[in-house]
């Protein structure tokens, strides 16, 4: 069998005395949705930033499509087909939604007309076609999350790293955007997502990795991971699994 | 060629001025305003579109001026060739300063301070180096012939500097509509987000600095030919760094016409103040300061920048009215 599209092997990152990511390994198989979950401060975003080239790893290896990519700058990774969204959305505030997406579209299209066509198509795909001419800073949180997604998509990625695209959305907005993400996967984009909204992780992801204090402590299908006692303890505190087990037994 | 209409109209109107106005005082004023507009357009490419605020564009202006003057006086190079080489030297200075600052990751105020330092270092070197004529400066020999890039009539100089300004307007417009320009603005807006979308921020900023350096150097080359004299205080002085950044900021940063409008307004106010008070020294600087304060307070995007904002407010208001109506 071919190697997964993304293979992260024993990656570590130290910030002074803090080992933010500690020999973490995970894979994202091509054409699937993989989730990375964990409590606040577990190091998920740091690991994402390492994969997307914004932070250098202290140790470890990251292979994408069979090639070692660790230490490459973000723009070169984007050219290879790795796109990311930011947990804290970063729109180009002074530009319109269309111009925002255009920046991403220009990666694979030099001509303005071709890039504008891509921007239009991507805008429709993520459901912001009606807002293309609005200034980006007038969008709601949900709109900004979609814009973040649209810009990344416009770069024509093979691997999409989504950092909490659902955070801050209300349940109906989440219901709206989940099919969009599933649609991306259906047309062949491999997705690795950090997510806190467990309902979405359960319905979207086929495989889940759990990161706590910089280490991967569990992995498996969403159901397996939710039942894992180490995961329950990581979220609810030491001894919680036993108490819950006791409750169920009693 | 959509979008180039306004440039054609503005340049055509300005080109007609010497046909109507024959006063040397007025033409001299306009020549200097256009020269400052050219220097400001150079700054605008890097600062306005790219968001990299340089405090040291004198480095480019002075390099252009000195290269033009020295090539003619010391090496017997033709003035027109010297002019072109001076522009190329400005581009090279942009490449060098861009490589040194952007490759080492300088941003924001650190970048501004380092550019200021470059200009000051060049000024000090030029004030002692023998090749620049040191403290005495370099005088270009009077030789009023078109081959020597010297003209009897102010109008000829006026049309030349206007042609340079027209070229710079076209360049700004083309950059605005190109992939490079889109990426440059993205870097200004948010460098990290731009990089995540595949923009090589260092290369884009460096390229902007090369173009910026070339345009501002063209203003310096023109200065040398017009006044036939260059010294370190003129060429690398802070006055030109200030005027190059002031005119786009007042006219409209990151807009095609911002530097031109800003230069005309600022220069007119400066001259007006001087006429009223009988040449009190430094008064033009006070006027600049006052105008800058007013513009930043009431139109932070400059005189032109205020227009789209006003239009945007109107268009944003109209659907709501329609919904209520």
Image (cartoon, grey):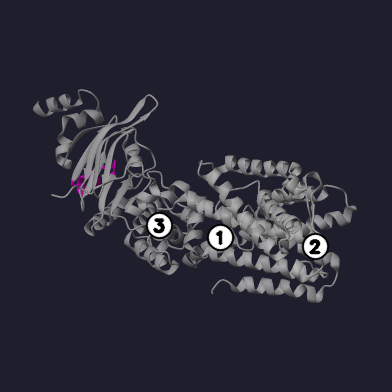
Q: Residue under circle 1?
A: B313
Q: Residue at x 34, y 56 (%)?
A: A153
The residue pinned by badge 3 equals A104
Name the residue that disc number 2 marks. B29
On screen, residue B47 versus residue A165, left or right, reads right
Mark 1 or 3, closer to the camera:
3
Measured Cα–Cα span from mark 2 to mark 3: 45 Å
Residue A209 placed where, x, y %? 22, 39
The residue closer to the viewer here, A192 or A170, is A192
Chain holding disc 3? A
Is A198 colored magenta in this rendering? yes
Q: Vertically, is A210 above or below B5?
A: above
> Which segment did they paint magenta?
A194-206
Q: Is residue B4 above or below residue B308?
A: below
What's the CA distance linking mark 1 and mark 2?
37 Å
Please provide percent x and percent y for residue B173: 57, 65
Query: Residues at badges 1 and 3 in contact (C-beta under 8 Å)?
Result: no
Which residue lies at the image location 51% right of the left edge and 55% below the top edge? B184
Could you say which is closer to the camera, residue A10 or residue B122?
B122
Secondary structure of the residue carrying tag 1 is helix
Instruction: Please name which of the two marks, 1 or 2, marks the residue nearer to the observer.
Output: 2
Which circle's residue, 1 or 2, is located before the other in the chain?
2
Q: Where's residue A53, x and y in %?
A: 37, 43
Decide which of B107, B61 is in the foreground and name it. B61
Q: Nearer the viewer, mark 2 or mark 3?
A: 2
Residue B22 figure quarter: bottom right
């Amino acid at each position: 069998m071919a190697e997964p599209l993304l293979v992260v092997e024993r990656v570590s990152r130290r910030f002074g005395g803090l080992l933010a990511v500690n020999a973490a390994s995970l894979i994202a198989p091509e054409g699937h949705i993989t989730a990375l979950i964990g409590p606040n401060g577990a190091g998920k975003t740091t690991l994402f930033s390492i994969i997307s080239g914004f932070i250098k790893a202290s140790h470890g290896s990251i292979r994408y499509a069979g090639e070692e990519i660790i230490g490459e700058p973000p723009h070169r990774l984007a050219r290879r087909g790795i796109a990311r969204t930011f947990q804290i959305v970063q729109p180009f505030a002074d530009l319109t939604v269309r111009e925002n997406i255009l920046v991403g579209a220009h990666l694979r299209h030099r001509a303005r007309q071709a890039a504008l066509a891509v921007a239009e198509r991507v805008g429709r795909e993520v459901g912001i076609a009606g807002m293309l001419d609005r200034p980006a800073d007038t969008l709601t949180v949900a709109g900004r999350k979609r814009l973040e997604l649209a810009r990344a998509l416009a770069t024509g990625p093979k691997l999409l790293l989504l950092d909490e695209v659902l955070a801050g959305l209300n349940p109906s907005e989440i219901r709206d955007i989940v099919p969009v993400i599933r649609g991306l996967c259906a047309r062949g984009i491999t997705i690795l997502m950090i997510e806190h909204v467990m309902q979405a992780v359960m319905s979207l992801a086929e495989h889940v990795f759990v990161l706590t204090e910089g280490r991967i402590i569990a992995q498996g299908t969403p159901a397996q991971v939710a039942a894992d006692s180490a995961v329950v303890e990581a979220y609810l505190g030491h001894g919680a699994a036993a108490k819950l087990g006791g409750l169920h037994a009693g | 060629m959509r979008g180039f209409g306004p440039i054609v109209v503005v340049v055509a109107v300005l080109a007609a001025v010497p046909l109507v106005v024959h006063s040397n005082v007025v033409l001299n004023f306009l020549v200097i305003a256009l020269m400052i507009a050219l220097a400001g357009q150079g700054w605008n490419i890097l600062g306005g579109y790219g968001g990299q605020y340089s405090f040291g564009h004198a480095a480019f202006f002075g390099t252009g001026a000195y290269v033009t003057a020295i090539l003619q006086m010391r090496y017997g190079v033709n003035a027109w060739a010297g002019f072109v080489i001076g522009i190329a030297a400005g581009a090279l200075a942009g490449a060098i300063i861009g490589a040194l600052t952007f490759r080492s990751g300088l941003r924001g105020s650190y970048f501004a301070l380092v550019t200021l330092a470059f200009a000051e270092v060049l000024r000090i070197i030029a004030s002692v180096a023998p090749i620049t004529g040191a403290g005495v400066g370099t005088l270009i020999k009077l030789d009023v012939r078109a081959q020597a890039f010297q003209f009897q009539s102010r109008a000829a100089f006026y049309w030349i500097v206007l042609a340079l300004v027209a070229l710079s307007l076209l360049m700004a417009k083309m950059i605005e509509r190109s992939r490079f320009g889109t990426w440059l603005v993205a870097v200004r807006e948010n460098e990290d987000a731009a990089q995540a979308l595949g923009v090589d921020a260092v290369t884009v900023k460096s390229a902007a600095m090369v173009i910026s350096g070339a345009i501002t150097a063209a203003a310096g080359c023109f200065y040398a030919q017009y006044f036939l004299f260059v010294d370190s205080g003129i060429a690398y002085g802070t006055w030109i760094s200030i005027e190059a950044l002031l005119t786009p900021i007042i006219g409209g940063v990151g807009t095609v016409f911002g530097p031109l409008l800003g230069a005309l307004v600022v220069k007119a106010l400066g001259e007006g103040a001087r006429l009223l008070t009988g040449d009190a020294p430094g008064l033009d600087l006070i006027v600049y300061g006052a105008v800058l304060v007013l513009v930043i307070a009431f139109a932070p995007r400059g005189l032109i920048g205020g227009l789209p904002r006003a239009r945007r407010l109107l268009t944003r208001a109209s659907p709501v009215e329609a919904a209520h109506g």
